[in-house]
Image (cartoon, coloured by chain):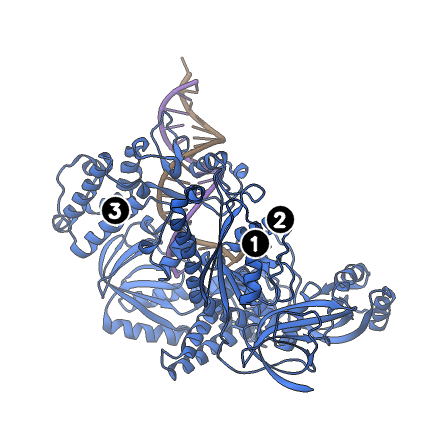
Chain colours: A blue, B purple, C brown
Amino acid sequence: MPQKLLLWLLDVNYDVEGRIPVIKLWGITDNERRVLVKDYSFRPYFYVLPKEYVDMKKAVKDIKLLEDPSEPILSVEEVDKKFFGKPVKALKVTCLLPESVPTYREKIAKLDWVEEVLEADIRFYMRYMIDNGVNPCDWHELEVEEEKNVNNIKVDAVYKALARPRPYPKDEVPNLRILAFDIECYNKAGSPVPHRDPIIMISLTSSEGNKILLAEDHDDSKILKEFVDYIQTYDPDIIVGYNSNHFDWPYIQARAKLHGVKLKISRDFAEPHQSVYGHVSVVGRANIDLYDYAEELMEVKIKTLENVADYLGVMPKDKRTLIDYLEIAEYWDNPSKHAILKKYAEEDAVSTYGVAMEVLPFAMQLSRLTGVPLDQVLAASVGFRVEWYLMRVAYSEGELVPNRVERKYEPYRGGLVLKPKEGLHENIAVLDFSAMYPHLMMKYNIGFDTYVPPEEPCKPDECHVAPEVGHRFKKNPPSLYRKAIEKLLELRRAIRESMKKLDSKDPCYTILDNRQKAVKTMTNAMYGYLGWTGARFYLKPCAEATAAYGRHTIMATIKMAKDMGLQVIYGDTDSIFVKYDQSKIKAFIERVERELGLEIKLEKVYKVCFFTEAAKKYSGLTLDGRIDLVGFEAVRGDWCELAQEVQSKVIEIILSKKDVQAAVNYVRDIINMIRAGKVDMKKLVIWKTLSKSLDEYEVEAAHVQAAKQLLAAGFKLEIGDKVGFVVVQGPSEKVSERVKPYVFATMNEIDKEYYVKKQVVALAMRILKYFGVNEESLLSGIKQASLFDFLRK
DNA sequence: GCGCTAATTATACCT
DNA sequence: ACAGGTATAATTAGCGCG
């Protein structure tokens, strides 16, 4: 019986059933039933772009001659498409099986008349979604017929699609069953290794509450089975973990293999598997690693679950049961400590669940916007998210998608940065252009499809010529990038418009707010993508021209400011800092917008603002009394906490009290405390990222030496990990020969003078030297002139 | 070989 | 595996030096 269905798409994959490819749409209906819709009607295809002056009839014949009867080619048809903006005739080759595509791509590419084979590397289910306007995390209307659930798939019903899905406008997100999990492993000998160390706890949190699965002493075979059972019973739509793609899942898989336990946790009772962008896929559900999201949180320097949960307000750090990671095994072996370990494990899952609640609404909107499935979208890098979005725009414009090619890195000039006017300033206005690069790309119709190469003629009034670099872009038709950006800007405008009509407590308001944020992120990423040599839609002159227009714009803005008597203090790429003069600022903004055709905003006003001679570093006292710290070591994760605290405090004292002596006294107190050993060693730890494998380093860097010590002690370290170390006393001059991972160090071996001079005093002096303080006086204690005296000079 | 400076390497920030 | 621009520390190379 044919029937209609509203489906919110959770996951998509494909299978070949009896030599027929089947697209599988896993989702949730408006009456909250979990269903699988199978579409048998879609076939894989790709395009062949012939060289010019090729007889298309012969070309079609040539392709058909390559056909292997066991891998049918269903059709070869001539189609009109565009490639780099130019109309082209291409051949669309449709196969029966997705596996045939790579085979025929290779064979056809070898034909002498073939210029290029295109879009042969787009995964089958992505192709399906793009071509049918199907979006993950969005609603679709379907005409279906119920099928017998022959394989006993874990859904309420299985349907056969009678027609292609149609997008259905609906903002709500269905109630989803979310499961957070976390494992604890026995780690008596450093980092746990699966062949030796069992999983001792699996902690689970869902809407049903918390549950902890405990190993029997050192035997985890039973909890692995319980884990599988729990998943099939609770039947989550979304499974979340923290670093689960790279730790929990591989570990569970290895332990399960050891015990011969089948991890039949997907909705089709298959095991989890490695998939694109390094994520682990569980068919019919969305498995999400929240660590991928944490990586984008620049404010959180050391990305532990505790820190992320604390930052997001999910679980304050001071309320957590924290146990030393190294002592987990000891807690396990000692029955009297079991309860604490359990609490710790439980809080991990609860935190993960809480973080998911904050992150998932955004992830869903990002998935919906980019078309990248929910379980992949956080794992996919920004470049790929932008690319999938652009591929949809390209599809709707009939533009063929260029192949991914390896290009050598080609640097080009970027934004303009002014030398700041050093010292203290009062009443400073910060103005910046809203989304400058995207707007420039639109304004000058920049794109790989509108670019006019130097040898090609173009009437001066029909093209834009970029300043400095001279690249030309046709004024018409609109470039793909322009269309894409226009769409994003219009979308954001419309979303914000609808938000105004809603109460901020309305669940739809939050959905829209997250949608609006996702659109903004994508808009901001367009320029970066444009200049990425790995991009399919890369063309160097586009990026170069955009940056050149940017420099031109900010230079013109600076000129106008000066012209209007506004003293320019600093500027970086799309922002300028000027002396605040309320009456002039208004006229200035109007003039900039009128003459440059771009929106500029008064971002904030600083009562007091401080610059050193260095660019990209400043601090300001805002009108509401807060202090902004930008670029200073105090916001960099590679300085010890104590030195950061000192620098922040010094800046605060200077900006709000203007009392140099107070700052000096404060620094001296800290110096004395260090020398007396009265500081918490944790505040002396320096964290640095391991950015490559240890043998690739060309110098003996401190954190690398520390990493080697950790490795020797049985710790596992990977690229991207942060190494925490302290500098200890020793015979060597070199810091790198006097480092110790902080986990091995004690306070009495610390090189206190290193911390005094190279950390605390160094950062304090960064500020205080502008107020007549010298290093010796900080270290010894000679009286200083006050700021008042200093300013009178 | 020594002592110095310049160059290189590495990291993390800003827009 | 989104861009370039910038600051900074520490290590290492290179230079003069009979």
Amino acid of disc 2: His
Q: Mark number for residue A646?
A: 3
Q: CA distance from mark 2 to mark 3?
A: 54 Å
Q: Amino acid at mark 3?
A: Val
Q: x and y percent of residue A337 in the render?
A: 38, 46
Marking on residue A585: none
Q: Residues within 10 Å of mark 3 (few under 14, many from 20)?
A: many
Q: Nearer the viewer, residue A10 or A683?
A: A10
Q: Residues within 10 Å of mark 1 (few under 14, many from 20)?
A: many
Q: Could you tell me if residue A544 is visible in this image?
A: no
Reading the image, the residue beneath label 1 is A224
Same subunit, tags 1 and 2: yes
SS assignment at label 1: helix
Query: Foreground: A227 or A283?
Result: A227
Instruction: Name the residue rendered at 38%, 76% in the picture.
Output: A594
Question: Depth check: A206 or A567 in front?
Answer: A206
Residue A713, compared with residue A646, is above or below; it is above
Report x, y in % for residue A695: 54, 36
Sequence order check, earlier mark of 2 and 3? 2
Q: Chain of mark 1?
A: A
Q: Secondary structure under badge 2?
A: helix
| Chain ID of residue with mark 2 | A
Q: Find residue A698 and report its horizontal and vertical position in percent.
A: 51, 36
Q: Are marks 1 and 2 in contact (CB under 8 Å)?
A: yes
Q: Which residue is mark 2?
A: A259
Q: Position of residue A694 (x, y in %)?
A: 52, 38
Q: Mark 3 or 1, which is nearer the eye?
A: 1
Whether residue A195 is situated above or below residue A131 in the rendered picture: above
- A341 to the left or right of A648: right
- In which quadrant will I find the N terminus of chain A? bottom right
Residue A557, visible in the rendered structure: yes
Which dot, 2 or 3, sits closer to the camera? 2
